[in-house]
Amino acid sequence: MSKLAALRDTLAGYERVVVAFSGGVDSAFLLRVAIDALGERVHAVTAVSPTMAQSEVREAEALGRAMGLGDRHHMIESHELEVPGFAENPTHRCALCKTELMDVAAPIAQRLGAVVVLGTNVDDLGDVRPGIAAARDRGAKMPMVEAQLTKQEIRELSRELGLSTWDKPQLACLSSRFPYGTQITPDRLRRVDQFEDGLRALGFRQLRVRFHDTIARLEIDRTEMARALELGEQISALGKKLGFAYIALDLAGFRSGSMNEVLVPLKRAR
């Protein structure tokens, strides 16, 4: 609770904020605490693009309404795939993405005399995250890092605050489903998105569909693997309907950032 108080104090120190809001656990928590601290001086911006799952677009809209944002929630079309180099999926793709996000959010913040705040937490600093440095370079603030909040603490506090997102599965933009160097296209994004939607419809919660050309590599929670094998025919049929020749179940299970496992160690975000 002392960290929650520290977060509120940090946010209260800003005249106005624009929360980069994806609808996930971290940004929903940050938005709620910002509203508690600043009231109507809080705006939110959601960058909508083919790299964002359609289910997440709908959920972000619904959460914005539930928090009473009204016209202070800006759903802005974003164009990551048009950013030079992004579609080629380089190892610094996240930096290009965060730069595009700031290009979307910064004009709103400038008009309002606000600062852009991100839902980054201290656990995010331990992975290969070039987007963090890019966002900082563009003036974004990360108040949950200042408050030293971890992912687990954010979930626990979200539950205490009555947020429906407290136990929401970990999410990431759809571009993270592609190995570095693999071309990202609207059609490929759509196929991955629809496959993941289909798996959720079958009752799976924490999952990723990783794109490997003709192969879809499924990462699901290891506790659900036996059930995945039982539903193998349905899952395979769904994948083949979406254009994959082979559907593989990754025995290591779900893990966030698994595409970074093949990288030569890079400088970590600090």
Image (tube, rainbow, N blue to C red):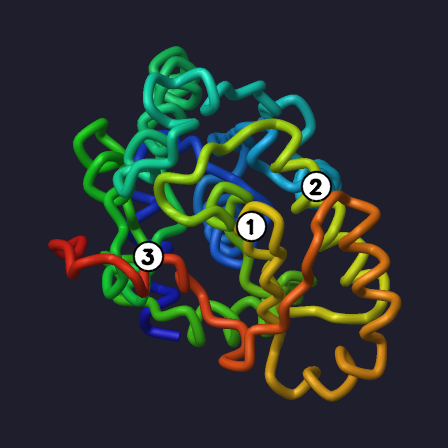
Left or right of 5 in this view: 221: right
Say if mark 3 contacts mark 2, CB within 8 Å. no
Tag nearer the camera, 1 or 3: 1
Give the residue type at disc 1: Phe
Q: Which residue is mark 3?
A: 144
Indicate which disc, 1 or 3, sits on the residue closer to the N terminus.
3
Residue that appears at 18% across and 53% down: 269
Q: Which residue is mark 1?
A: 211
Indicate which disc, 2 or 1, sits on the residue closer to the N terminus.
2
Where is residue 193 shown, x and y percent of the image?
68, 45
- Element class at badge 2: helix
Q: Classify 152 as above or below 267.
A: below
Q: State the quadrant of the N terminus.
A: bottom left
| Distance from Cα at disc 2 to Cα at disc 1 | 9 Å
Q: Classify 170 as above or below 38.
A: below
Q: Which residue is mark 2?
A: 191
